[in-house]
Amino acid sequence: MHAPPTAPRTRRRTRAIGFAALAVAMLMSVPTAQTAFGEEVQAVPGGGDLGPNVHVFDPSTPDIQGKVDEIFKKQESAQFGSDRYALMFKPGTYDNINAQIGFYTQIAGLGLNPNDTTFNGDVTVDAGWFDGNATQNFWRSAENLTLNPVSGTNRWAVSQAAPFRRMHVKGGLNLAPDGYGWASGGYIADSKIDGEVGPYSQQQWYTRDSSVGGWGNGVWNMTFSGVEGAPANSFPEPPYTTLDTTPISREKPFLYLDGDDYKVFVPEKRENARGVSWANGTPAGESIPLDQFYVVKEGADAATINAAVEQGLHLLFTPGVYHVDETININRADTVALGLGLATIIPDNGVTAIKVGDVSGVKLAGLLVDAGPVNSETLIEVGPENASADHSANPTSLQDVFVRIGGAGPGKATTSIVVNSDDTIIDHTWVWRADHGEGWGWETNRADYGVRVNGDDVLATGLFVEHFNKYDVEWYGERGRTIFFQNEKAYDAPNQEAIQNGDTKGYAAYRVDDSVEQHEGWGMGSYCYYNVDPTIIQGHGFKAPVKPGVKFHSLLVVSLGGNGQYEHVINDVGSPTSGPDTIPSQVVNFP
């Protein structure tokens, strides 16, 4: 879709019925399947092993530290490499472990509760590979573990696309690299930090549905929702934006062991959540046996993946890189598509990588979509155009679903993510048009739009979108909400003319369409670093209609080192940035 509607949309919601019963019926194992012409074909088998890139440990495994170190050595600086790994630890206690986590590496416990798997040691991310600068520590994760840090404080110095989920740290958590070099923001969810979290040099951070023993400081934008122990709302000084609860949340599905059997646990949706989901032991939700999943391994094609979904199987992508020459279509309610080890999907020949039907309860999680060299009109679509079904009881969710355009090689896409379905939850996404690596440049990795939301009642918790040629986020649906937004405008704009938007200087980072009557956002920042032409002026970071139902809280814009300037924060409101300082211009509430 090149030109979305600018007039108000009339959308009648219809309630989807019968999907749960249909899903149960389709999950029955069958030996064969039929094509549209009635021909019988071999059914796709469910279950099986997890492939060569999933390393499973128990406390008796010899030389765990040696194996973890071996993988870290390969992945420490492999920012655009093709290897993917998942390090999975069975329930038990592991002594004297320091698991350093590099690129495309997931570390996770295999218990149903984080306290089932305990390290007397650390899970560490630092930035020695990049001279103490953590702003490129992307694409890795830690999940479902309890840590007793050796020094009393665990170091997790990351930036985008590096979630810290379902973790219990029996001590403090340091989010800065050794030496307190730069770090540019991250995400914590469903975690308990007994001690203090020290952001130090972290420019921005979002924490959701967690518990902390304290929070040390803030630089530009620290946002909390549903966090026990969070600092009081005080933006802009200190720059804390705090919501007592998260309106709607559902934690990410995860792999675990039930005895000797692998299952995937799918947590229930929570409303007005506060604190971790596992505080009382077993969390609320559903367990799905592995034999109800097609375990996708490198070399699998889109036709087989689609056949598995049509047959009634869920999808578990093992760590790897997957080229698809046709769209992965998920049209069955409640389907889980879970990636391990930053499983990566590359669409070939300009196809859309993933399309979700206008059905309820689909869970996309733990996937990286990497644009191919032939332009894709879209990379991920949630719901078809003009989707209208009511999914409020059972929303579709995207969690730790990341998009990359360029960096690992040339890539192009007109719009990265389009959300047409109502009630969708976007929980932690980084949608990134590359500003370094290989295959990037103003036209080389052309990508005009990052995220476009057409559906009503869509909630984004942790929305990171950066460097698009035009609008980074456009919102057309009613009653949309965003809690925490982090953005950088495209560094590589060659001159003012290249970003000119009619009479407006530049495209807003986040634009709410004039047709929208209700929208709300909290804790939202846009930054510019026009290093090719530092004289570029950005008219504003945010654009929205001035209406009683459109509200923003805790907005800021920053000029990094004076490379480019903003004239306003939102519309024509807010003071300009000026000079080389990085002191943000802020608007506490709009209007």
Image: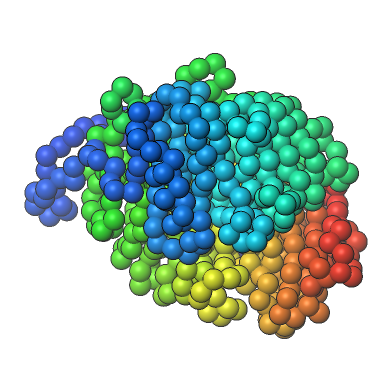
Is residue 140 shown to the viewer in this render?
A: yes
Horizontal relation, residue 121 to residue 230: left or right = left
Give the left or right position of residue 528, taking residue 464 as reference. right
Question: Where, by quadrant of the figure, is residue 5 drawn?
Answer: bottom right
- Identified at 47% across, 19% down, the residue is 282
Residue 358 visible in image: no
Towards the viewer: 381 or 62: 62
Most distant residue in the top direction: 280
Residue 386's spot in the image, x, y percent?
Answer: 49, 54
What is the x, y in percent for residue 573?
87, 59
Which corner quadrant of the image does residue 111 belong to? top left
Image x and y of residue 576, in percent: 88, 65
Res. 2 image quadrant: bottom right
- Above or below, 242 against 409 in this view is above
* Residue that appears at 38% across and 38% down: 63
Horizontal side of residue 159 vs 53, given as left or right:
right
Q: Name above or below for residue 61 compared with residue 186.
A: above
